Image (cartoon, helix red, strand yellow):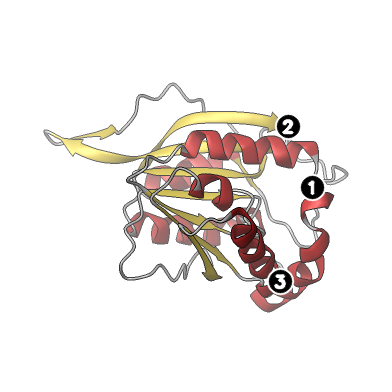
Amino acid sequence: MKQSIEDHAARFDEKAAEYDDSKSDEYRACASLVIDHAAPGSDEAVLDLGTGTGAIALPLAEDAKRVVGRDISAGMLEQAREKATERGLDSVEFGEGRFREPNVPDDAEVDVVTTNFAMHHLSDAEKRAALDVVADLEPGRVVLGDVMFFGEPDPEEPFYSPDVDDPATVGVLADAFTDAGYALTAVEPVHEQVGVLVAERVTGVDGVETPVGDSDAETDP
């Protein structure tokens, strides 16, 4: 992480009120894909990390049994809570938490983990540590929408700010998922620096590790 958690939180606190209106078409396309791939059932619980103003958590709360949104920015969380109240959603809750300390309630089982445009602030080693924490929660599915490199990174593009961002290649992310016990089942490029990865938990069958879902995903960086 190129800035401290406190610095990141303060930066997003300042942006919170205008955050939704400032997002690009690619961000919105990415968020839509995360929602589509998360697709929680009415008996499933979702953990949304880096929840921001609730762009992912709130739509999922319309279908899921429970949604837990976690973020480091008090300003963003306030916006998310206000929107939940306006929509009359009582199946979603927002609170402080981060990738490596998600602060999941003791009574919450996690079936699906989502995150959108948040993990790229972590270094590659921190991403691996975060996915290990996620894996310990034993969700069946993880849906990651983020800045990621499908080719050579171009720092001139608006999705990548070298001062605060540290995106990984798709290959690095795929390896991190594999090492955490997950297999990629979908790779959705939105832009050469933006995409969505879907990973299913690997389970042992007769001593052979098999992904929960069939995978034709390509993971070349």
From the image, state whether disc 3 or disc 2 is nearer to you.
3
Compared with 83, 153 (above or below) is above
Q: Residues within 10 Å of mark 2 (few under 14, many from 20)?
A: some
Q: Quadrant of the C terminus?
A: top right
Which residue is disc 2 drawn over? Answer: 191
Mark 2 or mark 1: which comes first in sequence? 1
Q: Which residue lies at the image location 59% right of the left edge and 29% below the top edge?
A: 188
Image spot of residue 82 (x, y percent): 66, 64
Mark 3 or mark 1: which comes first in sequence? 1
Image spot of residue 112 (x, y percent): 41, 47
Q: Which residue lies at the image location 68% right of the left edge and 78% below the top edge?
A: 6
Instruction: For marks 3 and 1, give the CA distance.
Output: 17 Å
* Residue type beneath disc 1: Lys
Examine the image and state in which quarter residue 91 appears.
Answer: bottom left
Numbered marks: total? 3
Residue 122 showing in the rendered view: no
> 61 or 106: which is nearer to us?
61
Q: Which residue lies at the image location 76% right of the left edge and 65% below the top edge?
A: 16
Q: Which mark is residue 23?
A: 1
Compared with 55, 6 (above or below) is below
Q: Considering the numbered disc 3 on the image, is that residue within a helix, a strand or a loop?
A: helix
Q: Residue furthest right?
A: 156
> 200 or 206: which is nearer to us?
200
The reply to whether discs 3 and 2 touch (Cβ–Cβ < 8 Å) is no
The reply to whether discs 3 and 1 touch (Cβ–Cβ < 8 Å) is no
Specify whether 47 is left or right of 81: left
Mark 3 or mark 2: which comes first in sequence? 3
Compared with 67, 112 (above or below) is above
Instruction: For marks 2 and 1, give the CA distance.
Output: 15 Å
Examine the image and state in which quarter residue 80 appears.
Answer: bottom right
Residue 9 showing in the rendered view: yes
